[in-house]
């Protein structure tokens, strides 16, 4: 009986894995190259929901960062860009949500190792329905605009 239940669970686990690959696709992921002394950086990417059900990005983690947060950027009435942490990010059915400089991004905080000198880093994105999606983000872009990064 116990074996039977375990194999059922295993089949469900397999089913949810293939589901993840089908519904949510993450592309164009890159991470901003920052000087080795910097303890934070930002990741940008595109999330396409190919399914017919809305999904949510509920968490992010990376082995190189103490924590990772979803941030949105807004500009106040003095023209100062500020970031706000979001608990989750809605990915509507059939749509692509773009995380880009000056807008929504993933913040890697308490970097344990510098991103400079790496070609890419790995991230785990957790979705409410699609589950875990592994992403490789290219390291690029030291010296271009800083994406309006003002951390409070
Ligand atoms: Cu941020």
Image (cartoon, grey):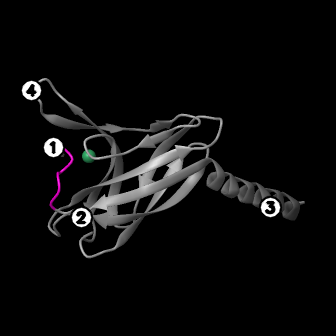
From the image, tell me which residue sits under label 2: 33
Q: Residue at x 65, y 52 (%)?
A: 22
Residue of label 4: 78
Whichever of callouts 2 and 3 sits on the residue coming sooner in the sequence is: 3
The image quarter in which residue 138 lies: bottom left
Please name the residue shown 40% across and 43% down the image: 98
> Where is mark 1, residue-wise?
150
- Tell me which corner region of the image, top left, top right, bottom left or bottom right, holds residue 88: top left
Query: Could you tell which of marks 2 and 1 lies nearer the N-terminus?
Result: 2
Magenta-span inclusion, residue 72? no
Rounded to the nearest angstrom, the CA distance separating label 2 from label 4 is 28 Å
| Front residue (pair 3, 105) | 105
10 Å crowding of disc 2: few (<14), some (14-19), many (20+): many
Distance of label 4 from label 1 (alpha carbons): 13 Å
Q: Tell which of 124 and 46 is nearer to you.
A: 46
Q: Are marks 4 and 1 in contact (CB under 8 Å)?
A: no
Specify the segment rendered in magenta: 143-148
CB-based contact (under 8 Å), mark 3 and mark 4? no
CB-based contact (under 8 Å), mark 2 and mark 3: no
* Alpha carbons under labels 2 and 3: distance apart: 45 Å
Q: Dots 2 and 4: beta carbons under 8 Å?
A: no
Name the secondary structure under disc 4.
loop
**SS class of the residue under badge 3?**
helix
Q: Residue at x 18, y 46 (%)?
A: 149
Residue placed under numbered mark 3 in the picture: 6
């Amino acid at each position: 009986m116990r074996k039977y239940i375990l194999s059922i669970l295993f089949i469900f686990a397999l089913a949810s894995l293939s589901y993840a690959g089908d519904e949510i696709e993450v592309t164009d992921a890159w991470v901003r190259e920052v000087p080795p002394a910097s303890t934070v950086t930002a990741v940008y990417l595109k999330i396409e929901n190919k399914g017919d059900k809305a999904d949510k990005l509920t968490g992010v983690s990376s082995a190189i960062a103490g924590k990772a947060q979803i941030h949105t950027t807004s500009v106040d009435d003095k023209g100062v860009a500020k970031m706000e942490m979001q608990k989750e990010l809605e990915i509507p059915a059939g749509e692509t949500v773009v995380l880009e400089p000056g807008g929504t991004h993933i913040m890697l905080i308490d970097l344990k190792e510098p991103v400079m000198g790496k070609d890419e880093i790995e991230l785990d994105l957790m979705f409410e329905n699609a589950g875990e999606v592994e992403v490789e983000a290219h390291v690029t872009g030291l010296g271009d605009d800083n994406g309006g990064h003002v951390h409070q």
